């Protein structure tokens, strides 16, 4: 299972191979073992994995033709059989590209399958990452660490820290972090560095900042200096979800009554201050208007007023956009003189979406979008562990959007997360393909319901009952497993599991009407349907309700 997909490859065969020993030599070979590519105590039948590393700084290792940009993440890999195992030759430009190559090898080692042949691999999107930017309880440090390592392992390179309910990010933006919280951020930054992830600290002062006040800007600068002191070099200035109008008289006078003028001023001033600390500091701004056509007055003026090296977050046509298109990206760039950096509100499920669990796959993002944007940063859910599944599909798309297939990617992501338990959990996760994106929910259930109804109305009652019995059996075993397994991810989903139990009982009762459609049996179905519809969580495609209602007409 190649995940994410290789860019270019000439693979002659796949071989089952679990190395009993790894021998590495050449450029930075100690790094192979520093990154944990070791052999477990339980040896498998196999040979020696030889890894030869060549450092080469040339066009073929440092340039991506499709996106016409330099990169430090490209690597070449050649694998061939030898008398006592497999020999892999890696050609890389630096430690970061070696890191990407070693992650690829580590994934093959986990599978116990290696390809024989050659490949040229690199990411098409420059910035690939996620933002903890939701409303709700911030993730624990342990969950952040686990997520960072997993997302980096599968190809992401950027993390924005911006939890709305971290008080020192938003409400107390003008106060310095206490020692304990600052220490945790320093540890998080260290993990990012170890995993070649660019860490962005975001501050959101817009609820109370007086833009014309030197004292207020001084507080913003001191906050940045504190974070700079622990090693932060990348920052985000978030001006979203604040009032449209200036509310201090001094600001109205200083900026001709327009918020956009104030936002241009504070963004450029903050950017200049960061550059005074270190010329390599970077700034991303999330504007007051962060979605739309991309050529409206505010965003056009803001973009043309900002320093060209400041990146601008943009969510697309809508807050949660079903599609992100090249055409829309071009409109944005022409209007603002900046390529968009997409703040993609997927899989986030806060605010009015809190009853939904977005465990589906990324969809509706055009394959060529990497040519017309800086990248995509996905906004995650409050449910950190559950966010892994959709985020893995984001990893897959961002690395190789041309080869991306969402539904296939989702199944691979579920196999990565659940491993041997994959088949046991899928009847439930099939009913959680829910989000703003254009994805058909409950494909497994829909197939069973459609098949059963066609058989029944075609006169094959026995066939209909057999189809439903098979599907209900799988779903029942799944629920039984979910109730007994000790898995923190499953614990996050408990309210949705409760609704799934009701749905399963309703399927059993509705199917029973094929044998006995008495009023007593119908009353049981109506009661379960009412319980199902009254449960606040969103689950299953509408076809489940339609099936129960159709059975009630028998």
Image (tube, helix red, strand yellow):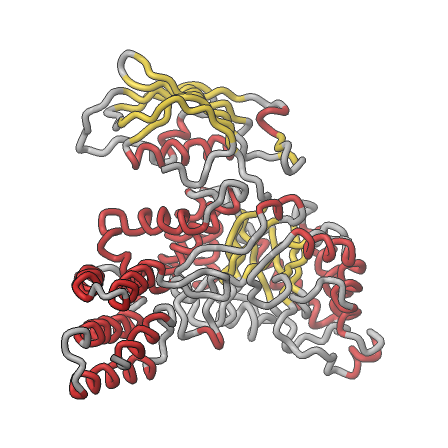
* Residue 180 locus on image (x, y percent): 43, 63
* Residue 510 locus on image (x, y percent): 22, 75
Please, is residue 551 above or below residue 162 in the view? below
* Residue 507 locus on image (x, y percent): 23, 72
Q: How many marks?
A: 0
On the picture, is 432 further left or further right than 155? left
Q: Residue at x 55, y 68 (%)?
A: 169
> Foreground: 177 or 56?
56
Name the image quarter holding the N terminus.
top left
On the picture, is 331 further left or further right than 7? right
Residue lying farthest to the front in this orientation: 459
> In this orientation, does residue 408 appear?
yes
Q: Residue at x 62, y 30 (%)?
A: 63
Name the image quarter holding the C terminus.
bottom left
> Foreground: 456 or 252?
456
> In this orientation, does residue 476 appear?
no
Q: Residue at x 80, y 64 (%)?
A: 301
* Residue 492 locus on image (x, y percent): 31, 66
Q: Residue at x 45, y 45 (%)?
A: 152
User: Image quadrant of residue 246?
Assistant: bottom right
User: Image quadrant of residue 58?
Assistant: top right
Please, is residue 365 above or below residue 541 in the view? above
Please, is residue 20 above or below residue 511 in the view? above
> Foreground: 552 or 400?
552
């Amino acid at each position: 299972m190649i995940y994410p997909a290789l860019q270019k490859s000439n693979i002659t065969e796949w071989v089952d191979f679990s190395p009993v020993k790894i021998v590495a030599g050449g450029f930075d070979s100690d790094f192979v073992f520093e990154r944990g590519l070791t052999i477990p105590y339980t040896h498998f039948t196999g040979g020696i994995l030889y890894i030869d590393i060549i450092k080469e700084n040339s066009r073929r290792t440092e340039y991506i033709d499709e996106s016409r940009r330099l990169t430090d993440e490209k690597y070449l890999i050649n694998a061939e059989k030898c008398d006592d195992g497999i020999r892999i030759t890696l050609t890389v430009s630096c430690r970061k590209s070696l890191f990407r190559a070693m992650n690829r090898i580590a994934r093959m080692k986990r599978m116990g399958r290696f390809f024989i042949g050659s490949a040229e691999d690199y990411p098409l999107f420059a910035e690939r990452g996620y933002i903890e930017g939701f409303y709700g309880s911030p993730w624990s440090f342990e969950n952040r660490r686990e997520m960072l390592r997993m997302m980096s392992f599968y190809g992401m390179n950027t993390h924005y820290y911006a939890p709305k309910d971290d008080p020192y990010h938003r409400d107390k933006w003008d106060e310095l972090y206490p020692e304990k919280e600052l220490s945790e951020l320093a540890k998080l930054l260290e993990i990012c560095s170890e995993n070649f992830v660019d860490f962005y600290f975001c501050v959101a002062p817009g609820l109370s900042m007086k833009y014309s006040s030197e004292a207020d800007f001084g507080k913003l600068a001191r906050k940045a200096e504190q974070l700079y002191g622990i090693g932060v070099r990348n920052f985000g200035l978030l001006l979203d979800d604040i009032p449209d109008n200036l509310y201090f008289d001094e600001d109205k006078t200083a900026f001709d009554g327009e918020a956009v003028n104030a936002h241009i001023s504070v963004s450029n001033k903050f950017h200049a201050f960061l550059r005074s600390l270190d010329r390599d500091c970077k700034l991303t701004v999330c504007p007051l208007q962060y979605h739309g056509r991309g050529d409206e007055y505010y965003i056009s003026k803001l973009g043309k007023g900002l320093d060209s090296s400041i990146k601008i977050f943009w969510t697309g046509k809508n807050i949660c956009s079903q599609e992100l298109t090249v055409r829309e990206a071009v409109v944005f760039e022409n209007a603002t003189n900046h390529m968009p950096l997409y703040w993609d509100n997927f899989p986030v499920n806060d605010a009015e979406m809190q009853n939904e669990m977005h465990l589906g796959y990324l969809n509706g993002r055009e394959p060529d979008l990497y040519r017309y944007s800086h990248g995509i940063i996905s906004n995650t859910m409050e449910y950190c562990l559950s966010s892994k599944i959709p985020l893995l599909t984001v990893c897959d798309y961002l690395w190789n959007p041309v080869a991306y297939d969402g539904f296939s990617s989702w199944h691979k992501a579920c196999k990565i997360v659940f491993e041997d338990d994959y088949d046991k959990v899928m009847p439930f996760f099939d009913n959680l393909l829910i989000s703003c994106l254009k994805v058909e929910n409950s494909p497994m259930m829909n197939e069973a319901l459609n098949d059963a109804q066609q058989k029944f109305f075609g006169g094959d009652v026995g066939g209909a009952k057999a189809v439903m019995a098979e599907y209900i059996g799988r779903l029942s075993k799944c629920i039984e497993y979910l109730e007994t397994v000790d898995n923190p991810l499953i614990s996050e989903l408990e309210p949705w599991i409760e609704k799934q139990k009701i749905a399963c009982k309703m399927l059993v009762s509705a199917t029973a009407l094929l044998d006995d459609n008495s009023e007593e049996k119908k009353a049981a179905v109506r009661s379960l349907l009412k319980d199902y519809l009254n449960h606040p969580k969103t689950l299953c495609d509408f076809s489940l309700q339609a099936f129960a209602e159709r059975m009630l007409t028998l």
